[in-house]
Image (spheres, rainbow, N blue to C red):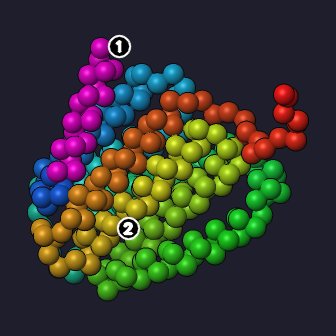
Amino acid sequence: MLVNKILKIVLVLLGISYIILQGFALQIEGDAVSAVAFVLLTWLYIGWTKHKSKLFILFLVVFTAAQVLGFLAWFRTIVPAGQIDYLYFLVNILSIISYALLILKMFMQLNFKAVFSQLTIPIIILVILDVFCVTLISSTTKSSFTYYEYALEFTYNAVVMILLSLALINYMYRNNYKSMLFLLGSIFILFSEIIQLAYYYILIDTTNSNLGYIYSFFLVVAFIFYYLQSQHAVSDPIPAYTDDPIEA
């Protein structure tokens, strides 16, 4: 349909604009573009997707709400030092909930008996790596947060790592195109979130950094993969190999 094609073109242009604006540290303008883009992406998915998922719709709606509130936060009164920034907590909690909805979506689609029987050792290794990575990543910004902000940031990082780990397990179990796209989207989400931490809380001067281009590019690419995988129906796992002889 014409509207479908127009929306996709507009989203591509908005994605490019977002990357450029974030690269030039024009954060207000970038957040405005991001909010509009996610509203349109949600509309595109709901209006023109054959195999809709209620949890994926909720993911888009909640993540979009976080982006809109993040943009509106620029126009509020400055929170005095020492007082709780409730909007900061709300935006991050919404983002955590949105990623948790994707985790729940995968949980509901996995056959855990089969997964644990086939992937016991990889799962144990992933749990160890998750604990190590979350602790390491969160510790780099510990001095920038209060106790409650650090707890929120730690939870945020943990949820993103769990999302990536489950995406990898889902891909090893299903071994199909949809699970591969979801895994790629989750990888780029993780990279984007890690680079954002460095961009906002470690660098002293963000105006002279290329990290703005990088994390925004990764975020755009992540949602391209998420949208592409959402256009495919969930299917049964594909065996990695077969014992059937090859016919001559």
The earlier-in-sequence mark between 2 and 1 is 1
Kindly identify which numbered label has been placed on residue 194: 2
Residue 32 is situated, as x and y percent measured from the top left of the image, at 17, 46
Kindly state the secondary structure of the residue where label 1 is placed: loop
Which of the pair 14/29 is nearer the observer? 14
Classified by dominant secondary structure, the portion drawn in magenta counts as: helix
Q: As displayed, is residue 107 above or below residue 162? A: above
248 magenta-colored: no
Residue 227 is situated, as x and y percent measured from the top left of the image, at 44, 37
Tag 1: Cα neighbours inside 10 Å, few (<14), some, or many (≥20)? Answer: few
Residue visible at 88% across and 35% down in the picture: 245
Residue 86 is situated, as x and y percent measured from the top left of the image, at 28, 65
Q: Disc 2 versus disc 1: distance between alpha carbons?
A: 38 Å
Residue 198 is situated, as x and y percent measured from the top left of the image, at 30, 73
Residue 228 shows in this picture = yes
Pointer 1 residue:
1
Position of the N terminus, as image quadrant, is: top left
The stretch in magenta equals: 1-20
Residue visible at 36% across and 60% down in the picture: 192
- Looking at the rendered structure, the kind of residue marked 1 is Met
Residue visible at 75% across and 45% down in the picture: 240
Position of the C terminus, as image quadrant, is: top right
Locate residue 174 relative to residue 184 in the image: left or right: right
Residue visible at 29% across and 17% down in the picture: 3
Locate residue 129 relative to residue 125 in the image: left or right: left
